[in-house]
Image (cartoon, grey):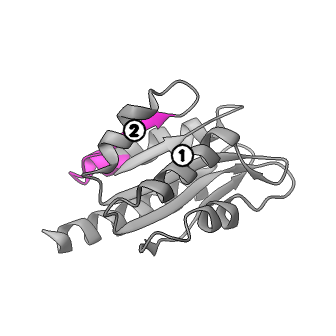
Amino acid sequence: VLIPYASMHASTAKMVDHLVTALGERHVAVQPFNMTVTDIGQYALRLVDAATVVFATPTVLVGPHPSVVFAAYLTAALRPKLRYAATIGSFGWAGKAPETVRSLCSSLQVEWLDSVFARGAPTATTYKALDALADGIATRHRELS
């Protein structure tokens, strides 16, 4: 699982940290990429072997963070053999980040898993939804083996 992400007020970063831990507990290999500092070549290289990508983004002016937009665009352009994708993140008052990411990746032949978005900082309900996402990813990855 690759998680390209950006975080502006730590909410999305907290969600990424939780999902990374949850996937690790389920024996799923996971690699987060902070897209504001990542060598894009390293992200592209890891896409070759990835089964799942989870785009993690705060909402900026109704859509995803520009760094995550670039990651989604690059992912779609490279057309890796991904099987699954999802979006997670946070928003303040409104947003269309999940829909925008899906639109940017419309050329990918993937199963989109449920999005997990928190209004502001993640809550216990958010973490429970992230655990459910981790369960779903782990189950699907076991079926691939």
User: Which residue is the site of mark 2?
Assistant: 43
Residue neighbourhood size for the residue with mark 2, other residues' Cα within 10 Å, grouped as few (<14), some (14–19), many (≥20): many
Residue 24 magenta-highlighted: yes
Between 39 and 22, the one nearer to me in the picture: 39
Q: How many marks?
A: 2
The residue at the point 76 percent across, 62 percent down is: 96
Q: Where does residue 3 sit, x and y in percent of width and height?
A: 44, 46
Q: Where does residue 2 sit, x and y in percent of width and height?
A: 38, 47
Q: From which residue to which does the magenta span run?
A: 22-34
Q: Secondary structure at mark 2?
A: helix
Between 42 and 84, the one nearer to me in the picture: 42
The residue at the point 31 percent across, 64 percent down is: 81
In the rendered structure, the answer to whether residue 61 lies left or right of residue 7 reads right
User: Which residue is the site of mark 1?
Assistant: 71
Q: Where does residue 112 sit, x and y in percent of width and height?
A: 48, 72
Q: Amino acid at mark 2?
A: Tyr
Furthest residue toward top = 37
The residue at the point 49 percent across, 43 percent down is: 4
The reply to whether the C-beta atoms of the residues labelled 2 and 1 are less than 8 Å apart is yes
The residue at the point 54 percent across, 46 percent down is: 71
